[in-house]
Amino acid sequence: MGKPDPELLRNVHPADALGELKAQLRPLQQQVKKLRAQLLALPASERRGEDWYAQVSVYTKITLDLKAMKKEFGLERLRPFMREKPYERINMVKNRKKRA
């Protein structure tokens, strides 16, 4: 069996652990965005670092404008081709006051 998860040993509530991780991710995501923009601005010949090479690939993504399609064809004609996909989303909200 593997080593126990240190977070579980600290008896931290999963909401607190997830909230803290998301707070730590925000600055990293901002840094990734800045570095990505810097790399895209460089010519390919200057995208090689000491340890990594940034290879840029360009893809085309085709999407459908559902709002425009509903207007053009009507919702009833589109309904047989539509699928609903349920999902769960967790929004972390910082507690205003600590519990006593």
Image: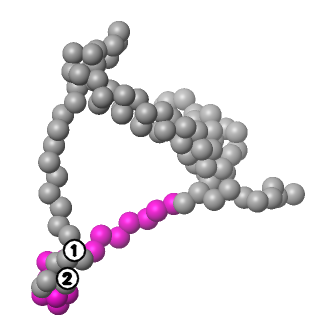
At 20% from the left and 77% from the top, the residue drawn is: 68
Res. 7 image quadrant: top right
Given the image, on which type of amino acid does mark 1 rest? Leu
Task: Look at the image and tell me whether residue 87 can be seen.
Answer: yes
Does the magenta segment cover residue 80? Answer: yes
Please give left or right for residue 88 compared with residue 75 in the image. right
Given the image, on which type of amino acid does mark 2 rest? Lys
The disc placed on residue 70 is: 2
- The image shows residue 13 at horizontal and vertical percentages of 66, 51
Range shown magenta: 74-90
Q: Residues within 10 Å of mark 1 (few under 14, many from 20)?
A: few
Q: Residues within 10 Å of mark 2 (few under 14, many from 20)?
A: some
Residue on which disc 1 sits: 66
| Contact check, label 1 and label 2, Cβ < 8 Å | yes
- The image shows residue 83 at horizontal and vertical percentages of 22, 74
Question: Looking at the picture, does residue 49 appear above or below residue 9?
Answer: above
The C terminus sits in image quarter: bottom right
Res. 46 image quadrant: top left
Instruction: Choose between 96 and 100: the one closer to the eye.
Output: 96
- The image shows residue 29 at horizontal and vertical percentages of 47, 39
CA separation in Å, label 1 and label 2: 6 Å
Please give left or right for residue 39 compared with residue 78 in the image. right
Instruction: Choose between 11 and 77: the one closer to the eye.
Output: 77
Task: Look at the image and tell me whether residue 79 can be seen.
Answer: no
Please give left or right for residue 86 compared with residue 46 in the image. right
Question: Looking at the picture, does residue 60 appear above or below residue 93?
Answer: above
At 30% from the left and 29% from the top, the residue drawn is: 41
